[in-house]
Amino acid sequence: MKALVVRGGWEGHRPVEATDLFVPFLGKSGFEVRVEESTSVYADAAVMSETDLIVQCVTMSKIERDEVAGLRAAVAAGTGFAGWHGGIADSFRDSADYLQLVGGQFATHPSKEPGECGGDETDNFLSHAVTMTSLGREHPITTGIDDFELTTEQYWVLHDDLIDVLATTTHPVRPWHPWHRPIVSPAVWTRQWGDGRIVVTTPGHSLDVLENLNVRTIVERGMLWAARTASAS
C-alpha cells in the first residue's frame, strides 16, 4: 500500500508538523509513505495510479487545472482522499472542481463576543460539542466514540447532500450574531466518489487539537477506511 502526503499552503495550520504527527502511524499501518510539498504531483498520472491513499494538508493556496483533474481521476479510480480542517475543507477556494470533489467547504468560524476579542487566533476559539450522528455511532471510523467537547475553531461548513455525515457541530445564536436560528454543520463526513472514498474531519486547527484522543482516532481510522479497497484495485 502506498500513501501520498501532500502538504503546504497557509503556514498557520502547521502543515509540516501536523502531517508529521501521522506519518509514523501510516508506516506502522503498512504504508510506504511519500511526502510532497506541492500539488504538482497530482498531475503525474503514473504516481497517482499507484497511490492507494492521499492525505492532504494544504490550506487555501492555488491548484492548476491539470492537477485537480489528476486528483479527481485518481479518486474516481479508487485512491482514497483524507484530511482535516483547512487542509482539505478550505483548500483551493477558486477551484469549483475541487469543491465538488470534497462536497463541503469552510465558510467561517464564528468568534467570541466582540468585547472579548483581543485580535489573535484565540478570538475564534469557542467551546463546542462534536455530536455523533446515528450513522456515526455505527461507522467504522467513529464507532465507540462518544460526543465530545473541544475549545478551538468551530467550522461553519457549506455542503451538499452527497456526503454521509458521521458527526455534527451546532452554532448557537448569540445576541451579536446576525443569524436567527442555530446552524448545524457537518464536523466529520465521508463521501463516495466513483470507486474512491473521501474522509473530512473539520477539527484540527492546531497540533493540540490533532493530538486530542478523539480527533486523532477519527483521523487515523479515517485514513485507513479511505485507502483503496480490494474492489477498487
Image (spheres, rainbow, N blue to C red):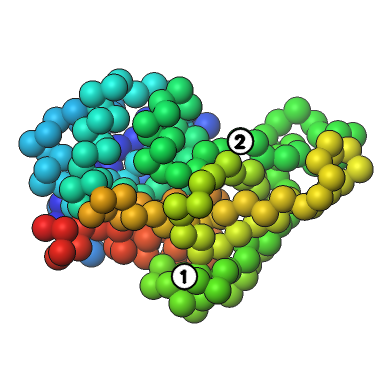
Q: Tell me if residue 173 comes above or below residue 217 in the rendering.
A: above
Query: Which residue in the protein does label 1 denote?
Result: 142
Q: Quadrant of the N terminus?
A: bottom left
Q: Residue at point 88% right, 38% down?
A: 176
For residue 155, side relative to residue 214 (left or right): right
Residue sitting nearer the eye, 95 or 91: 95
Q: Mark 1 and mark 2: span between their CA atoms?
A: 25 Å
Type of residue at label 1?
Thr
Residue at horizontal 40 percent and vertical 48 percent from the top: 83
Residue 34 position within the rendered picture, expressed as x and y whole percent measured from the top left: 19, 43
Picture coordinates of residue 113, whole percent (x, y):
86, 40
Residue 37, position in %: x, y? 29, 30
Task: Farthest residue to the left: give it.
Answer: 46
Mark 1 or 2 closer to N-term? Answer: 2
Q: Residues within 10 Å of mark 1 (few under 14, many from 20)?
A: many
**Residue type at the position of mark 2:** Ala
On the image, the x and y values in percent for residue 42 come to 22, 32
Which residue: 56% across, 62% down? 167
Element at badge 2? strand
Identified at 15% across, 64% down, the residue is 231
Q: Which residue is mark 2?
A: 107
Sort mark 2 into few (<14), some (14-19) or many (20+) by Cα contacts within 10 Å.
few
Position of 14 relative to 10 (above/below): below
The front one of 71 and 15 is 71
Query: Is 119 positioned to the left or the right of 72 in the image?
Result: right
